[in-house]
Amino acid sequence: MAISKLLVANRGEIAVRVFRTCRARGISTVAVAAPDDTGSLHARVADETVAIGSYLDAAEHLRAARERGADAIHPGYGFLAESPAFAAAVEGAGFGWLGPPAEALRAGGDKLEAKRIAREAGVPVAPDGAPDEIGFPLIVKAAAGGGGRGMRVVRGPGELGDALEAARREAMSAFGDDRVFCERFVERPRHVEIQLLADAHGAVVSLGERECSIQRRHQKVLEESPSPALDPALRARMSEAAVSFARAIGYRSLGTAEFMLDGRDFYFLELNGRIQVEHPVTEEVLGVDLVDEQLRVAAGERLGTAGRQPRGHAIEVRLYAEDPRSFLPQAGRVEHLRLPAGIRVDAGVEEGDEIGLGYDAMIAKLIAHGRDRAEALERLGSALDETEVGGVVTNLPFLRWLVGHPEVRAGRATTAFLVEHPPLQRWPERDAPAPWRRPWRLNLPAPAPKPPPDLDRAASDRRDGAESSTLVAPMPGTVIRVLVGEGDGVAPRQPLLVLEAMKMETPLLSPYAATVRRVHVAEGERVAGGQTLVELE
């Protein structure tokens, strides 16, 4: 079908990104805006904007598309992007759908069903099952979603009950489905994903890989292409596995097969049935516009990307309004914003915009391309030095530290990087190999990574060098569990309550052994950043 007007059923940076390709193709654009988001950048740059009640209300997007005479709907990369019901509703209403068929979303979106299909297609998957079958450590995962939500690492039987409960609660909040499962946890794997593109004529191609190993709270921080961990033979094997899975579920449009890489062994994790946040690194390396490819597939055209050869190296980092040590989201007005020139920047806000906690706190993605990995890193480091943000706390200091870190520069980072290198710590004096890489240590058990102290630290103030008796909220959110009462004795790092923000749960811990003097909040209560939650003595 010919597309002359497109509605994006999403907000922020991805909506702005899709509109950019539409303008280049002469396609009119329609934005949607929730009541608390009417002044956002994506609503300002679209040709037309429609007010809707909620970004998660499928009926509202269909109403907006009908009202403005849109031909097609692009879901961006929000939750609706992977909803089989939404895909079916869009096509059932006669609109073009810039995504995979509902049946493919249904098969690939359920992690348990996807693993079954992968096994039948000969694609390796990580062992899963009952905890006593797979042993510890293990990871609890939500069956219906991703993005780090509904995931908990469990290192022993004593942690299992709380982890299952928290994962189910978080999965229900994020996906409306509280099913979880247990999978073997690999301590230091790499996270590598294969970009797929499939048309309506049965053609499926791999567009190379992206390395996404550096993560916080199971969410990606830095992505690059190609992966420094892959050689041509391993790349070919992983690409073949990804294409086989896509064929097995009748895939169409863009999609990403995610794998855990352990040495030269790899295991299928999930299929993301949408465009990915990190898609620009693939675009920079291959010289393609992936949104344009989505438009072409939706229009019934055949793939035009076969035979494209990668050139150079591309690296992306995500600039967020979040604490650079704890990664907890922050809110505020962007009073000053200077984004770098000379590299690609995909921004979701402008100077003067307000960043709240109701939506993703991304400010922009910075993408540097170079002739090789070293040049891409140098260009990205210089771009981060140019970047300035005022009025809101951001992870900019963390990104500068990260891009210059010797382990990152050497291409050795795994998913345990931020466990073994807490944010903003001093770099080693020299680039010595980590202990687990020394041959004389290979016959010993690998040391179990501990959580970075700042990722789950208690939000306590310090006055005159002493620990305060007051535990405060590190961000606005909702208290979903109160775990202690007045008079209770607590141990160091014992969870006192659980705070939820942006559908992610954050346990707040006691900074030292103490007695609970007073609890100021109740379950279900909304709290502001800095608000007193618990007093200790």
Image (cartoon, rainbow, N blue to C red):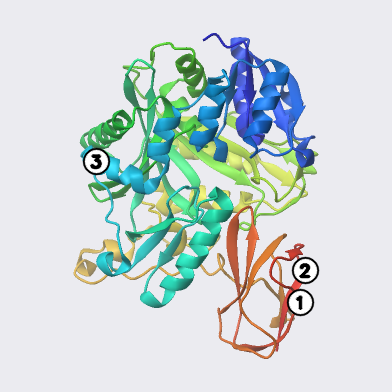
Task: Please name whichever residue, 336 or 157, is drawn nearer the observer in this view of the structure.
Answer: 157
Q: Earlier in the sequence, mark 3 or mark 1?
A: 3
What secondary structure is found at the residue carrying circle 2?
loop
Q: Earlier in the sequence, mark 1 or mark 2?
A: 1
What secondary structure is found at the residue carrying circle 3?
loop
Q: Which residue is mark 3?
A: 123
Query: Does the rendering let one see residue 325?
Result: no
Q: In the image, is 361 to the left or to the right of 92?
A: right
Task: Please name whichever residue, 254 or 230, is drawn nearer the observer in this view of the structure.
Answer: 254
Q: Nearer the viewer, mark 1 or mark 2?
A: 1
Q: In the image, is 32 to the left or to the right of 82?
A: right
Q: Amino acid at mark 3?
A: Val
Q: Are marks 3 and 2 in contact (CB under 8 Å)?
A: no
Which dot marks residue 531?
Answer: 2
Which dot marks residue 520?
Answer: 1
Q: Nearer the viewer, mark 3 or mark 2?
A: 3
CA separation in Å, label 3 and label 1? 52 Å
Q: Residues within 10 Å of mark 1 (few under 14, many from 20)?
A: few
